[in-house]
Amino acid sequence: MIQDETGELETGSGWMVGGLAFAASVMVMVGSFSIVAGIAAIFDDGYIVVSRRYAFDLDTTAWGWIHLVLGIAIVVTGFSLFANQAWAGIVALVLSVVSAVDHFFFIPYAPFWSILIIALNVWVIWALTQARKIRG
C-alpha cells in the first residue's frame, strides 16, 4: 500500500513493491559494507594501501570517515525506504550517486570492491527509477 498525494492509500503493483524492497535491501547491504570498511580504515592505517601519485590521495583515516558517514546515511535511508517514507526515494537516489562517485575515486585503493559497489549502486538507481515510473 502506497499513499498518494492526497494521503489516501493506493495499492502498488508487485513490480513496484519488489523494486523498492530490492533497492532498500541493497542499500542496507552497501551501507553496512561501507560502515565496516570505514571503521576498519579509521582504526587501522594499514587497512588501505595508499598508491603513489594518485590525484585524490587522502589520508586513510579521511577515507574511513567518508565511508563511515556515507554508510550510516545509506543504511538509514534504506530502512526509511522499507518504512515507505516519502523523502526516502529521492534521498536514496542522491546517496546512491554520491556512493558511486565516492567509490569511483576509491578504485586505485580497492579496484574490485569499488567496481562491485558502483555496480550495486547503479542497480539501486535503476530499481528506484523503475519503481517510480511504474507508480506513475
Image: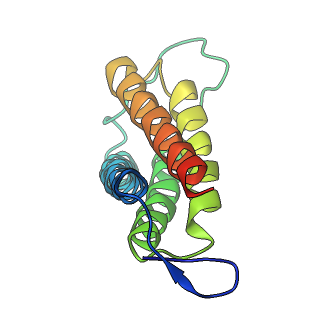
- The quarter of the picture where the N terminus appears is bottom left
Q: Residue at x 33, y 46 (%)?
A: 37
Q: Residue at x 53, y 76 (%)?
A: 85
Residue 60 visible:
no
Front one among 32 and 92:
92
- The x and y percentages for residue 23 are 40, 51
Residue drawn at x 50%, y 32% is: 103
Q: Position of residue 7 (x, y in %)?
A: 63, 88
Say above or below: 108 vs 39. Answer: above
The vertical placement of 51 against 132, above or below, is above
Asked if residue 100 is positioned above or below residue 133 in the image, the reply reads: above
Q: Is 100 left, or right, of 38 in this rendering?
A: right
Residue 76 at least partly seen: yes
Figure colour scheme: rainbow
Q: Is residue 49 left or right of residue 6?
A: left
Compare residues 18 and 95 and report the one nearer the observer: 18
Question: Picture quarter containing residue 92?
Answer: bottom right
Q: Quadrant of residue 99?
A: top right
Q: Position of residue 100 (x, y in %)?
A: 54, 35
x and y, in percent, of residue 111 in the image = 39, 18
Q: Residue furthest bottom?
A: 7
Residue drawn at (53%, 13%) of the image = 52
